[in-house]
Amino acid sequence: MSEKTMFKLQLPTDPTWVKNVVESNIEEILTDHAYCEQKAATNAITLIIQNPNISELVQEMAELAKEEMDHFKRVHDLILKRGFTLGLERKDNYVNELIKFLKRGGGEAKRTESMVDRLLLAAMIEARSCERFKVLSEYVEDQELSEFYHELMISEATHYTMFIGLARKYGEGIDVEKRWQEWLDYEGKVIKSYGKAETIHG
């Protein structure tokens, strides 16, 4: 089953991205990946701060934050093993474009809508990250990286499922399936500009 079918992503990543871009600058892709994991942990903590009254979400995000920081350390270990050092944080233009699609607003009803949208944003990022990890695992010639990204692909898929599940469970009064399709359509347009840089989402 293809990732396009699994996650309904509108545009699959061209495998030549690995050969033409990633393999020529492994140090850059690892640094960017490390910061992706750090930002995922930060997002989990932010969701806790914004929704302290939803105990299940707090528990799930606490576990996720630990897991994402463990991934960060594992990527950093690879960086050090290869004689590199962690560079400065890179901008994630892809994620910044997705953030523009978030619904915001005050009031209790809008608060729930905003929470659901943040969960769907996270699910969207996890879905694309999973798809990118799959492409990396299948096409990178470096065996160590191939195995590493295969393992992380499975992990990202479970994160995607968790975020979607929480959105459905706590999105009372919101057509979550309709909103998720809107996210898929929007991401399909955004991703057309990416797949050319040595970053996880680039």
Image: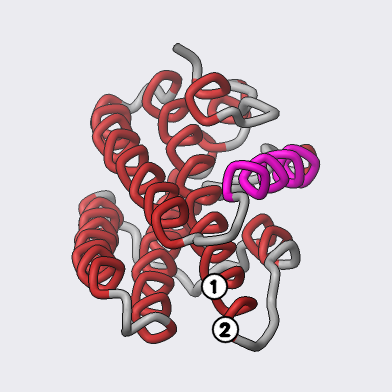
- What is the three-letter code of the residue carrying label 2? Glu
Residue found farthest to the front:
173
The residue located at (32%, 83%) in the rendering is 53
Q: Of the numbered discs in the image, which one, if any, rests on residue 191?
A: none
Q: Residues within 10 Å of mark 2 (few under 14, many from 20)?
A: few
The stretch in magenta equals: 176-191
Type of amino acid under label 1: Thr
Find out whether the residues at labels 1 and 2 contact each other: C-beta distance under 8 Å. Answer: yes
Q: Is residue 45 above or below residue 1?
A: below
55 inside magenta stretch: no
- Rounded to the nearest whole Å, what is the CA distance between mark 1 and mark 2? 6 Å
Percent x, y of residue 166? 38, 56
Report which residue position mark 2 lands on: 108
Q: Nearer the viewer, residue 179 or 44?
A: 179
33 to the left or right of 91? left
Asked whether, in this view, residue 86 is left or right of residue 178, the answer is left
On the image, the x and y values in percent for residue 197 come to: 65, 45
Other-residue count near label 1 (Cα within 10 Å), few / some / many at <14 / 14–19 / ≥20:
many
Residue 15, placed above or below residue 160 = above
The quarter in which the N terminus is drawn is: top left
- Residue most extreme to the top: 1
Quadrant of the image occupied by residue 189: top right
Which residue is disc 1 drawn over? Answer: 112
At 69% from the left and 28% from the top, the residue drawn is 11
Q: Position of residue 55 (x, y in %)?
A: 24, 74
